[in-house]
Image (spheres, rainbow, N blue to C red):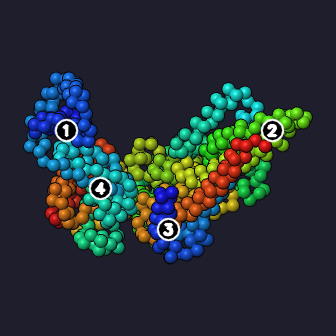
Amino acid sequence: MLVTLALVYELWVNSALSRHQFGWHFFVTQTWDPVAGQFGALPFIYGTVVTSMVALVLAVPAGVGAAIFLSELAPRKLSDAMTFLIELLAAVPSVIYGVIGMFVLLPVIKEYAYPALKNTLGWTPLFQGPFYGVSFLSAGIVLAVMILPFIVSVSRQVLMAVPQDQREGALALGATKWEMTWKVVVPFAKQGIFGSIFLALARALGETMAVTMVIGNDPKIHASLFAPGYSIAAIIANEFTEATSDAYISSLINLGLVLFALTIVINGVARLLIHATSRHSAQPA
Amino acid sequence: MGPWSGRSSARGAVSGRLVVTYPLHGSYHAPAYFYFSFRSNHKMRMNSMTLLRSLAAAAMLAPLALTAQTNVTGAGATFPNVIYTKWFDEYHKVHPEVHINYQSVGSGAGIRQVTEGTVDFGASDGPMTDQQIADFKTKRGTEILHFPTVLGADVPVYNVPGVATGLKFTPEALAGIFLGKITKWNDPAIASANAGVKLPGADIVVVHRSDGSGTTYVWTDYLSKVSSEWQTKVGKATSVNWPVGLGGKGNEGVSGLVQQTSGAMGYVELIYAIQTKISYGLVRNVSGAFVNADLASVTAAAAGAAANMPGDFRVSITNAPGKAAYPISSFTWLLIPAKIQDPAKKKAITDFLKWMLADGQRMTEVLAFAQLPKPVVAKELKAISAVK
């Protein structure tokens, strides 16, 4: 608690110069020019949000699906073994994800995913233009893999906390296994699953190392997911050590404040949801 | 330094306080029986060889062992980190009473920390600006001195299918490519300098550093000198607003992206290009010769600039004169405050500088850093006396 307050205080005080100098323009301008002392945060906020969204779009269906499989369908032994393996993914350092993303995933995306997406969805503005490998899309995919264990692990826990009576009741009423899962178990665990998604999102927003290695680090806003971009965490990590002017450092800290605010809000929501669910499942209906 | 290493026990023995060197003694009162068994255990572990060595060391170190340790801390540039680490390590071997701790946190952070006084000296790949020097003066009430230590170079690296290493680049071509004006590999600006090389019509994908870096400073400093458009539009700094291109983190990020992307072109430190065996190009210097970057051509660039070396050593040697000079070279500097309060630290730092300019210079080439030219060394030796 004290640490959090001290953090916010430090971020707030040290970003004062940037807030004073650029005001709300900081959030809506796109130029990031350390030489001229012009700092705008929009491309970074955009990049952070877009990559996190791509990651969620990919990881949520896969993660929730896997959690349902593990809790409802798989035999207990298989379920435990697989969950263990999936949770191991969460323990892999992010720089490893970055390196794998860069040297293994990028060529694969370029070779297979890019032509496929371009041919099928090329008419939408999301999938246009040249592709260099590093892009919003690649960063989103790497993030999806990184946040998957959070979704699977927490969702599985929540699904398994659904009282057995509920399942038996549904089956007794003549529901098929499919109906039981979708109409009884998942709705019962809904809030907990949302909680896991928010936790995963918070992780995606703050991820630094893996993102900076595959996003292309180009502070521009492009509609296409094939284009390179930049994220808040990545620019702070990249430029903080060499930032010399006061306005420069202050702007980077200001970016940190923005990211902090984003994650705090998301964490708060997640906590509330998880709290609500655990109370639910503690007293079977 | 644990009690088991030869030197520390030898020191203890010489000063007649073997027990005192145990780290346990001060903070942890072991029961007597444990304590004694611990000690005899320790003695048994020392085989005759270690004993001999410690005795020899004791004889040598006896006078030093009684003087206090001097701890000096520094922070800054990452580019010369390898050679600095080696130097501080080697220096500690010959002067065990001095321990220099160096953190390679980046040039910008090095300048900030030495200005704030949190470290004894800084290190930077680019010289401090007049504004930074003025800030230092107001905060610390003394001057900051620059001491060049070694030389490094940036090389243009590329990945063009069917084109071997050794492509020739004119300054105009380099500026044009990084400004986004030259977009094809078979552009006349590149082709005219490379008669006989079959260049494809592929797009050029520019790759630059995403992290703030001295490498970028040297590269943009060079482009600013050879292109007025670059100077007004982009300028020189450790990170800039790039007109085009992708950002890779670190030398490894840039070379990784270049190696993976067909048609890519970037810049990395010379040592890095040699180690990763990536294709890199020659650059035309002021005299009109296309020069390959190597230790000799980098030292030649410094020698060309040494003639007009200013008294404070703040000099950029990019685009240096001289037929053999490689044009994208740079010094890297140690930043030493002109007044050091603690006499022990002052002595340690000035002694190290003298050692670095003599013995230290002989260790650079193994690590692919170019030596300082002799006139620069002579000039620096004189400048050391300014540290008070």
Q: CA distance from mark 4 to mark 1?
A: 28 Å
Of residue B255 and residue B183, the one placed in the foreground of this image is B255
Of callouts 4 and 1, which one flags the residue occurring earlier in the amino acid sequence? Answer: 1
Q: Which mark is residue A166?
A: 2
**From the image, which quarter does the C terminus of chain A lie in?**
top right
**Subunit that carries the residue with mark 3:** A
Of residue B74 and residue B302, the one placed in the foreground of this image is B74
The percent coordinates of residue A196 (x first, y second) are 66, 47
Please rate how many residues cluster around mark 3, counting C-alpha atoms within 10 Å: few if below 14, some from 14 to 19, many from 20: some
Mark 1, residue position: B21
Is residue B124 shown left or right of residue A272? left
Please rate how many residues cluster around mark 4, counting C-alpha atoms within 10 Å: few if below 14, some from 14 to 19, many from 20: many
Q: CA distance from mark 2 to mark 3?
A: 49 Å
Is residue A87 shown left or right of residue B345? right
The lab-note entry on whether marks 2 and 3 share a chain reads: yes
Could you tell me if the residues under marks 3 and 4 are in contact, i.e. CB atoms within 8 Å?
A: no
The percent coordinates of residue B269 (x first, y second) are 41, 51
Query: Circle 2 — which element?
Result: helix
**Subunit that carries the residue with mark 2:** A
What amino acid type should be assigned to the residue bearing mark 1? Thr
